[in-house]
Image (cartoon, rainbow, N blue to C red):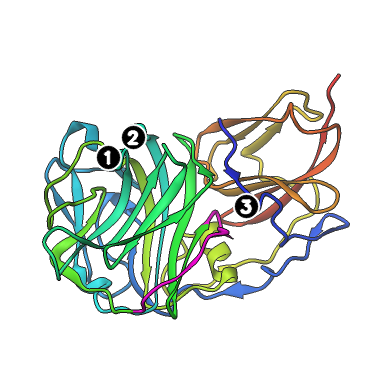
Amino acid sequence: MRITYLSNFLWKPLLICVGLVWGGPLSGQVDLDEGLVLFYPFDGGGLGDYSGNNYNGVAVGTLPFLSDSSLILLNSFGETYVEIPHESLNELLDFTVSVQVNYKTLHYEGTSENGQNAIVSGGANSSAYANDLLITYRIWDQSFVIVVDNVNYYFTDIILAENTWYCLSVVRNNGLLSVYLDGVKLDDEYLIPNNPLNLSPGGLLIGQEQDCVAGCFDSAQTLDGEIDNLRFYSRALSEEEQEAYCICPEVPVGEICQLTGIFTPGELPNDIKVYPNPVNQNLHIQTIDSQINGIQLLNQLGQVLLNKTKINTGDTIEIPVSNIANGSYYLFIVTEVGRFVYPLVIFHE
């Protein structure tokens, strides 16, 4: 795998390690229900809205493949997308769009506007050829491009890898546009007009960038990959809530995200294996029954050296550590039942 490089903020100053106990600001509980207007967990192979607002999705074109826990769009095989009721975001001032995304193929078209990887797009009601909202990633200039009211805003120096899960949120808060990746706020932000979103009926889509409402698609701008846990909010989530979403994105409506319960060193669940330890070149993490929602590697000062989200049940990942100095480190593993801290030694012979 490739490590996600988040330029200029690799050190994430939110964790303090004292005696192997995580005492950062995420201790306690976070309620992710307030202002929730849409929630697609994609559980059981459905496009149902679990927010209670009945904004159910509709599959259009080649039927998307719905696994038991995610939506898979392979747009290299056709014009596939999911239509979302535009009322779920229409006329909002403050908003948050949060999603987990795993690109299977990243479109690269050189220095061209065509090379995009659209997650969500919203056709503008004011013009047949404009986007009032677009969330997309461009690998050729390593940037997220967020379009609001047909204006492009660029969040740069972000290298994403294929076949890797990322936790992404786009937020407008009183006119301030921000992006969070894996719970961390990106450096770029923009003060933009705080006009209500004006989306065209039938024009709010998952998986396509549209040059006319619900059409005029380009095969080099689609989502070829997998998404999970899509949430829309009618407010801006706080930084603590952003991190909570990435840690427990599947928390059901009406329940609380539990951020307490750090276990003593070494007490990993029986079905999670970490090896070898000490490690020289490559660290392996295997999960049999548990889904891992986050992994962080910290040094003795509490500085985050690696941040990875979501490892599916039954997967084994390999993490290169050859470029990390000899020493003692802490591996934090977040699952649906709690957080675990595991002492790790890196030793290069």
Mark 3 or mark 1: which comes first in sequence? 1
In the rendered structure, which disc, 1 or 2, sits on the residue that comes first in sequence? 2
Residue type highlighted by circle 2: His
334, 212: nearer the viewer: 212
Identify the element where label 2 is drawn: loop
Circle 1 sits on which residue?
114
- Type of amino acid at the residue the image marks with label 1: Asn
In contact (CB < 8 Å): disc 1 and disc 2: yes
Task: Give 97 or 188, whichever is nearer the viewer.
Answer: 188
**x 19%, y 60%: residue:** 130
Residue where numbered disc 2 is placed: 107
Disc 3: which residue: 334
Q: What span is in magenta?
A: 181-194
Q: What whole-number distance in Å separates the C-alpha atoms at marks 2 and 3?
A: 31 Å
Q: Is residue 294 above or below residue 29?
A: above
Q: Amino acid at mark 3?
A: Val
Give the Cα distance between marks 1 and 2. Answer: 9 Å
Q: Is residue 179 above or below residue 286?
A: below
